[in-house]
Each structure stands twice: as structure tokens, then as C-alpha cells.
Amino acid sequence: MSRIRPDRITTLPGTTRSAELYERALALLPGGVNSPVRAMRAIGRKPIFVERGDGATLWDADGNRYVDYVCSWGPLIAGHAHPRVLAALSEAAARGTSFGAPTAEEVELAAEVARRVPSIEMLRMTSSGTEATMSAVRLARAVTGREALLKFAGAYHGHVDGLLAQAGSGLAAAALPASPGVPAAATAATVVIPWNDPDALTAACAAHRFAAILAEPIPANMGVVPPREGFLQQLRASADGNGALLVFDEVITGFRVARGGAQERAGVTPDLTILGKVIGGGLPAAAYGGSRALMEHIAPAGDVYQAGTLSGNPLAVAAGRATLELLDAAAYDQLSATTAALAAGLAAAAADAGVKVGVAAVCGLLTVHFNSEPVVDYAGARGCDLDAYAAWCRALLDRGVYPPPSQFEAWFPSLAHGEREVEQTLAAARDAFAEVACR
Ligand SMILES: *Cc1c(COP(=O)(O)O)cnc(C)c1O
């Protein structure tokens, strides 16, 4: 239930603190935000200004509370302000917040990543997933001596120029910039094909010699659209046949869908892996890694230049390590069960209300696609009833549940989401589906 805490109200009657903050923010930040989806324009409402979070709960600046399924878009697999993460952070902060020099802790974090993800023998940390992707692409181009990249429509790999690309008219042809300001030359070497389409993959590989085939192994940036049986295996075989590196962007799936990420679940081994989100436990950290032979091309071991003032930042490393320590086998069982209970309950609630949806779910990730057909690619995701999704989200927010405010983003249940939160969510979802049904 949303509720107002009278002690929090410091604004004029008839307005709210969030509305006032939004107005000020609009004058100072483009669209009032520091990253677009937060503005909640896709669901036709104003953003939430957050006051604080604890576990699965978020409080906004007006004192409303929500069960949070955004969880910072993935990093907070242990929920907000987990005591073990906070303890690790304050202990690290007391010793200094940044050195620009190596620390023992970053070596331990690298060792833990390598234990969990056997395809990563060596890694380089960065501060964001975007940086990690950009650097992995540079490495792939350097070692193959090729420039072309293959990516999938609806996949997001950060806002790297060459990957902010959309398919042109010919599927196996150069992609078009997906944003003004991206030079056509930057996407000219990128080819975009539909996800889960074996024939398009075969055709693209026949037409180009790629430096890298880049994929989210379980795409979650067009909503969750899992690979069809055998598709990741085909990616591996196609990369080998083409002479390209297979790069898995596991920024979302890494340490979330399994201890060793999507590659562990699928049994498919990429050449390079990109990590982010969970690896920083809510602080800015990301990484890219692979075999020692590949990674030793990175400076100063090799000649592929890449650097970062705050890379391996001690606070981010401490939060990441503390988070990974919480992620044992029991944690994945729990997260898996929570996700399954939510998915089944949401599907049942929609069916009871007569609203046609499909629910895609993998451990720690789910999407309610407002589409009567199964969604297997970006065209399917775009074919969803976006107005119905928006209305459903607004109805959920009114009932104290904070879903991703876009059909094209995943829900991120965490270890802090227990039975109580799931029940509260499903009760709100039933009401919200009923409201959407009689629109
Ligand atoms: C979030 C995300 C990125 C970009 O990470 P940032 O830290 O936001 O730059 C890259 N790839 C995937 C799959 C992501 O979900």
C-alpha cells in the first residue's frame, strides 16, 4: 500500500515534494534525469525521486513506499543497503576511497570471478558496462585484425557509438546510427540481425568476416527474450567458422542467472565476457575478461590501450566482493524460487483478468510481455501493447509496487524479496490487471 507520511510533507498544499524536485531537475538535468529510462516517459508519468531503500523496499520523497523490482537495474541482487555490503563499504572507505594503484582486494575479486566463470582467466576492470563493451570490442578488433561486428536487434551493450546501431534495409548490410550524433562511419562496420534467427545468422556470417559476434546470452534489454534451444551453440559454431570472437555481454546475466552466469547455464563458452551491474554490488564497476592469451594483448601486458582513473575502485571492489560472497548455491535456489513464484502468479493473475500476456522468466529476471504471441525477438517485443503495459505499471505504482517503467526492461527480483513481498506484488498485480482489462 502506498501511504503518505505526514512528517515528510514540507511542500505547499496541492503539490508534492517529488513534483517540486522534478520541476527543479527539469531546469538542471536533461529531461530531469541522469539516464533516460528513469524519467518514466514510456509509461506516461513523472519520475519517482528516491529517498532511501532497505532490502526490497524503496521510499520516495513523498513518503510512498514500494516493493522495488528495478533494484538499480540489476546490481542490487542482495537488495538495498545489505548490512554485509554496507560493512564492507565502510571498512574500505575508512582506508581511503581511491588510490589509482593496485590493491590486494581487486586481485581477490578477479580470483573470485575466475573461479565462477572458467572462461575468464584474466580480466580488466572498468567503471561502467559501456566502457567494458567498448574495450572488449577494441580487443576483438585488435586480435582479429578485422573491424566488422555482428549484433542482435534489441540487444543493448551500453551507449558505445558503433553499437548504437539499428538494422538497415538489407539485413546483412551495414547498420544505421540509432541516435543523432553517432557517425554513420561508426555503425558502418556493424551488422544487426534478429535474435533467435538461425538463417539470418548463417547469411550474415557468409557475407562478412567479423571481429566479434556480440550477444547478450539471455537478452534482457528488450524485456527478457531467452535464446531458443541450440541458438547459443549456433553462435559458438558460427563464430568459430567465421574466425570471429564470441563475446557474451553478461552485464545483466553475470552472477544473476547462475553462479557462473548464462554461459554456465547454457554450457556455451565465449571467448570474451563482459560483466557489470552485480560485480559492483551497487557501486560503479564492470569488467571484461577471457583467456590469458587474449587478455595479455591489453596494455601494459600488450599493446591494446585501455585505462581508467577509477578502474578497480576500492569501494566498488569491496561492494562487489561482499555481494558475491552472498551468492552461494542456496542464494541461487532462493532467487530461482522467488522468480518462479512471481512468474507463475503474474501469469495466473493476468489470465484471471482476461489480459493476454506472456511471462518470460529466468532466475532473477522476468518480463510480462503484453502480447498474445510468444516474444522471441525484438519485432515481437515491439509488437507488445505498450499502452496496456504503461497503464498496468501506473496501476502497480499506485499500489506500492515499482516495476520497470518500460516494456523493454526486465524485472530484477532480489534475495531481499521474500514471500511477503511476492504476495503483496501479486495482490497489486491482480488489481492492476483488472484495471487494465476494463480500460
Ligand atoms: C546495463 C548494460 C550495459 C551498460 O552498462 P552501464 O554500466 O550502464 O554502462 C551493457 N550491456 C548490458 C547487457 C546491460 O544491461
Image (tube, grey):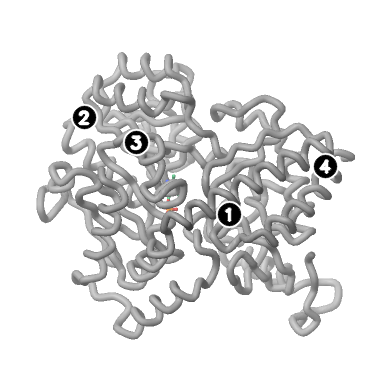
Residue 84: x and y in percent read 44, 74
Identify which residue is drawn at 42% across, 38% down: 216
Residue marked by disc 1: 413
Residue marked by disc 3: 186
In the image, residue 145 above or below residue 53: above
In the image, residue 112 above or below residue 87: above
Distance between mark 1 and mark 4 Cα atoms: 23 Å
Estimate how packed mark 4 is, as few (under 14), some (14 to 19) or many (20 or more) residues with alpha carbons within 10 Å. Answer: many
User: In the image, is the residue at mark 4 within 8 Å of ligand 1 by its beta carbon?
Assistant: no
Disc on the earlier residue, 1 or 4: 1
Distance between mark 4 and mark 2 Cα atoms: 50 Å
Kind of residue at disc 4: Val
Q: Which mark is residue 436?
A: 4
- Of all residues, the one furthest to the right in this rendering is 438
Residue marked by disc 2: 146
The quadrant in which the C terminus is found is: top right
Disc on the earlier residue, 4 or 2: 2
Disc on the earlier residue, 2 or 3: 2
Kind of residue at disc 1: Pro
- At numbered mark 3, what does the secondary structure look like: helix, strand or loop? helix
Q: Is residue 406 left or right of residue 173?
A: right
Mark 4 or 2, closer to the camera: 4
Distance between mark 2 and mark 1 Cα atoms: 40 Å
Estimate how packed mark 3 is, as few (under 14), some (14 to 19) or many (20 or more) residues with alpha carbons within 10 Å. Answer: some
Estimate how packed mark 1 is, as few (under 14), some (14 to 19) or many (20 or more) residues with alpha carbons within 10 Å. Answer: many
